[in-house]
Amino acid sequence: MSNFQNRHCLALSGGVGGAKLALGLSHVLPVDQLSIVVNTADDFDHMGLTICPDLDTVMYTLSDLASKTLGWGQQDETWEFLEALSRLGGEDWFQLGDRDMATHILRSDLLRKGKTLSEVTAQLCNSLGVKHPIYPMSDDKVSTQVKLKSGKTLSFQHYFVRDRCEPAVSGFQFQGMDQSVPSVGLTEALGRQDLGCILICPSNPFVSVDPILSLPGVQGLIDQSRAPTIAVSPIVAGLAIKGPAAKMMTELGMPQTVLSVAEHYQGRIDALVIDHVDLESKECIEALGLKVLVTNTVMKSLDDRTRLADDCLDFSAKINA
């Protein structure tokens, strides 16, 4: 991390996997050297509430409130509301915990009163003691739609939670993307003169990272930046550490490999971080014109998270040099 002194890191994150590396970064970088921008294309309205799953996962993780077993939701959660809702015949497929409900209710109330999602997120983070800034990718509504091989289209949470990722996918579209603008937090971070690294956390490339990179103007700002864009592969030894990324790759006709991840990001990143078990793919990835760091990318402990954060920052400093 010493090689990264006086530089700023912009981390682009989805949910559980991204939150792990975001936590590691928050432990090795001071508040003024880190911006965390989170996917909001999986946000949705449910039971009259605005639910922001990825934002909440990152926020709870950095506040040490996240469930240690699930990786999402809050630790020591109770489910009395959900049980009562089920008895009344309500939609109980999306797990709304009692503690979690307070976040959704307050957020929804503040949004109705005219605050932006960025303002609401800052207020929630401040209340939970989160020091490092967390920004939504946009204050505008973008909705991931999952196109199925059956010809149907599902909103992401219906595919991901209600249907448990079982339907075969054929592609994705981001409803409202053309009318959206990046959040101020995202554009300001990309415009910083001291920006030393744009780090894509090990999140799902298709439904967590692509929405951020697809925001109008964002790729252009990334291309203009002198900072290297580095992605951490969410695929290790042909498997996704968390979530349906590997299953999606198969259904999209892509091999479940780190090389496929590199090919997906080719032209948009400068380097890829892969795990030791995928060392044999290093030369093929480098043949695509990408730099490669081989290290331990499986984050089981806080030490793993901070070590990977340090490795990524040192790698970016070497690229800058």
Image (tube, grey):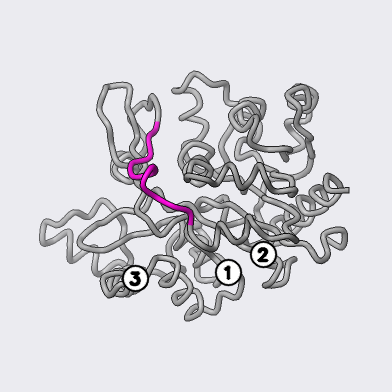
| Circle 1 residue | 133
Upstream in the sequence, badge 3 or badge 2? Answer: 2
Residue 78 can be seen, yes or no: no
How many badges with numbers are in the image? 3
Q: Which residues are magenta?
A: 172-182
Cβ atoms at labels 1 and 2 below 8 Å apart: yes
Q: Residue at x 47, y 52 (%)?
A: 39
Residue 256 can be seen, yes or no: yes
Label 3, residues with CA under 10 Å away: few <14, some 14-19, many ≥20: many
| Circle 3 residue | 107
Q: Decide if residue 170 is on the left or right side of residue 237.
A: left
| Amino acid type, label 2 | Leu
Cβ atoms at labels 3 and 1 below 8 Å apart: no
In depth, the one of 121 and 186 nearer the eye is: 186
| Amino acid type, label 1 | Pro
Q: CA distance from mark 1 to mark 2?
A: 7 Å
Q: Is residue 107 above or below residue 16?
A: below
| Amino acid type, label 3 | Arg
Label 2, residues with CA under 10 Å away: few <14, some 14-19, many ≥20: many
Q: Decide if residue 143 is on the left or right side of residue 69.
A: left
Q: CA distance from mark 3 to mark 2?
A: 24 Å
| Circle 2 residue | 34
Q: Residue at x 37, y 56 (%)?
A: 140
Q: Could you tell me which quadrant the N terminus lies in? A: bottom right
Q: Residue at x 89, y 48 (%)?
A: 321
Q: Is residue 68 above or below residue 127?
A: above
Q: CA distance from mark 3 to mark 1?
A: 17 Å
Cβ atoms at labels 3 and 2 below 8 Å apart: no
